[in-house]
Amino acid sequence: MRHREKHRSGRIGWLRAAVLGANDGIVSTASLILGFVAAGASSQQIMIAGVAGLVAGAMSMAAGEYVSVSSQADTERADLRRERYELAHQPQEEIRELAEIYEGRGLAPELARQVAVELMEHDALAAHARDELGIEGAAYTTRPVQAALASAATFAAGAFLPLLVVWLMPVAGLGWGVPLASLIFLALLGSLSARAGGASIRKAAARVTFWGALAMAATAAVGALFGVSV
């Protein structure tokens, strides 16, 4: 039977974006809500602030992800254009360059050159993009709009959870209800991301809950001290 291995490293890209968006949505919105609660705001004011935080945060995440991915794509396209030019005008230099990379990984000089020649005969640009530039095939089709929408959606999903607590609970109970529920949400998020990535569930859950609790405590303290939220 053919030996097959199942690796999780291919999930790193989307898993990182999803966890970052949802975590940021929970922490920032819950912290904002607690700042208003500590400042003595009404239930209506708290809900308005939370919804505004959701919209602003989702748009900020979308804009940031779009700019980041677009910049990455621009840099990769520039490198690929330069590589195409060099392949067209300096093919022997490019063979030598690729062979030196393989020598550095442990191949004998003759074998390294043979591998470089055969790979370049198959797809020269792909070989140099992967082994010289570190650009995998998926990077050729980087989608800034898709990344922006995904980040905005995961942030909104995370931000919706503490808002749901505000909607369901009386304002008198929000001081303990929002942080408790948010920490539970964060622990679940950390556990799910760890399970998807094959990491330690306990460590991942503890990590996100610790930093979430710290952020909420700091914002609540500011709200109580100054009578405003940040």
Image: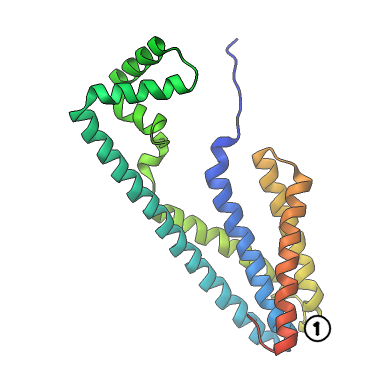
Q: Give the left or right position of residue 20, taking residue 125 as reference.
A: right
Task: Report the residue at 75% width, 45% height from top.
Answer: 201
Q: Where is residue 183 shown, x and y percent of the image?
A: 76, 62
- The image shows a total of numbered marks equal to 1
Q: Quadrant of residue 98?
A: top left
* Element marked by disc 1: helix
The percent position of residue 140, horizontal first and vertical second, equals 35, 40
Between residue 16 and residue 175, name the one nearer to us.
16
In the rendered view of the protein, which quadrant contains the N terminus? top right
Q: Which residue is mark 1?
A: 172
Tell me if 221 is positioned left or right of 149 in this view. right
Identify the residue at image location x=40%, y=11%.
111
The residue carrying pointer 1 sits among few (fewer than 14), some (14 to 19) or many (20 or more) residues within 10 Å by Cα, namely few
Residue 55, above or below 73: below
Q: Is residue 163 above or below residue 133?
A: below
What is the image's colouring? rainbow
The kind of residue on which mark 1 rests is Ala
- Residue at horizontal 76%, vertical 83%? 171
Residue at 45% x, 53% y: name it: 147
